Each structure stands twice: as C-alpha cells, then as structure tokens.
Image (cartoon, rainbow, N blue to C red):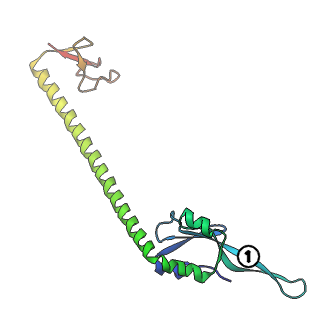
Amino acid sequence: MPTLYEHEIESYGFGLNYTSSNIQLHPKGINNEVWLDLQHSFYTQLFGYKKEITQLKYFKIISHRNQAYTQKYKGRNVSKEWVIGYCKHNQKNADNRIKEYEEEEKLKHKQRKAIQEARQLHKEQEQKALQQAEANALEIHKHKEKITGYRPDAALCPKCRGDALRHCHYCEGTGWVSYA
C-alpha cells in the first residue's frame, strides 16, 4: 500500500500538506505554492468467494506545477517511486525557490521595518512641530495682546486646536485666537 511521508522527501527540499483527499507537494516552508497535487488511486480485487478487498495502488496526478504540465499529465497514475524521482529531479529548483522565498521575506521584513521607522520619524516631527507651535504661541502671547473669539483674521487656537468643547484657558473656550 503506497503512501508518502514527509521524511521521504524532505531531504530533496520538499514538504507535504495532507488534505481530506489529496497530498500536496510544495517547496519546504512555502505551503501555499503547491508544485504537485496527488490523490490516491484505488483499485479492487476479488479473493475467493464473495470476498472483496480495496487497496491503494498508485497516486493520481490532480494538478502539476504549471498549467501546461497539468493539462499534459492530469489524471495520470504514478507510483511512489515516480513521486520521489520527481522530488529528486526538481531538488535544485526547489532549493532555489526556497532561497528566493527567504530573500523575499527578508526584503519584506526590511521594508516593514523602514515603514515603521518612517512612521516613528513622522510622529516625532509632528510632536516637534506641535511643541514649536506652542512655544511660538507663548512667545506671541508675551509680546502682543491676545483677542479671543472668531474674527476674520483669527486663527485656530494652538493649544486646543480649535476644539471649543474643551475648557481651554488660552482661547477661553472659543477655539479662536487673534493678536493685536
């Protein structure tokens, strides 16, 4: 009874996924990239008087690595030795794909890290700009007379950013500040 185990093919750079009816071969560590999808092929033998035994004999190819090979080999019965030979034959390709995948993952990790650093830098710059605006507002407040409430030349309050629902002492709760 042929069946396929992961320890038989992992030395060739392949891994297995088992579904309810299929066995899927993929480059080790890349589970979503199926190179060969197999199904057990059943056959029935009669032994003696009304005694029936069902055994597993071959694997049936459901899908191959690409569309052209799938059209060419779909439905073909293959042996366990053929599957192991397929793994040996495609060992270099699988190893190369694993290396490419690892490089892609490293690049994605670097990109994510760069995005996080850029966000952190942007956040720090926003904080600096807010502190500078508050410092400028205090400097203006020292030298000019502040007028609260809306006027055509009024600007949003730098402390509460125009949120009049807060109890801002700088704009006296109006959200607007101008200077004379």
Q: Is residue 93 left or right of residue 180?
A: right
Query: Left or right of 14: which side holds 128?
Result: left
Q: Which amino acid, by three-letter code, is at mark 1?
A: Phe
The answer to whether residue 43 is left or right of residue 157 is: right
Position of 110 with respect to 131 (left or right) is right
Q: Along the line of sight, which residue is nearer the eye, 154 or 163?
A: 154
Marks counted in the figure total: 1
Residue at the extreme left: 143
Task: Residue under label 1, please give it.
Answer: 42
x, y percent for residue 76: 65, 73
Which residue: 67% across, 74% down? 40
The x, y position of residue 31, in whole percent, is 51, 66
**Residue found farthest to the top:** 151
Residue 132, x across and y down, in percent: 17, 33
Residue 53 is situated, as x and y percent measured from the top left of the image, at 80, 82
Q: Looking at the image, is 154 positioned above or below residue 20?
A: above
Q: Nearer the viewer, residue 52 or 127?
A: 52
What is the secondary structure assignment of the residue under circle 1? strand
Q: Is residue 7 above or below residue 147?
A: below
Q: Quadrant of the N terminus?
A: bottom right
Q: Quadrant of residue 47?
A: bottom right
Q: Quadrant of the C terminus?
A: top left
The answer to which image quadrant residue 137 occupies is: top left
Mark 1: give few (<14), some (14-19) or many (20+) Cα within 10 Å: few
Taking the view exactly as shown, the residue that stands out farthest to the bottom is 48
At horizontal 52% and vertical 79% (from top left) the residue drawn is 9
Q: Residue at x 61, y 81 (%)?
A: 80
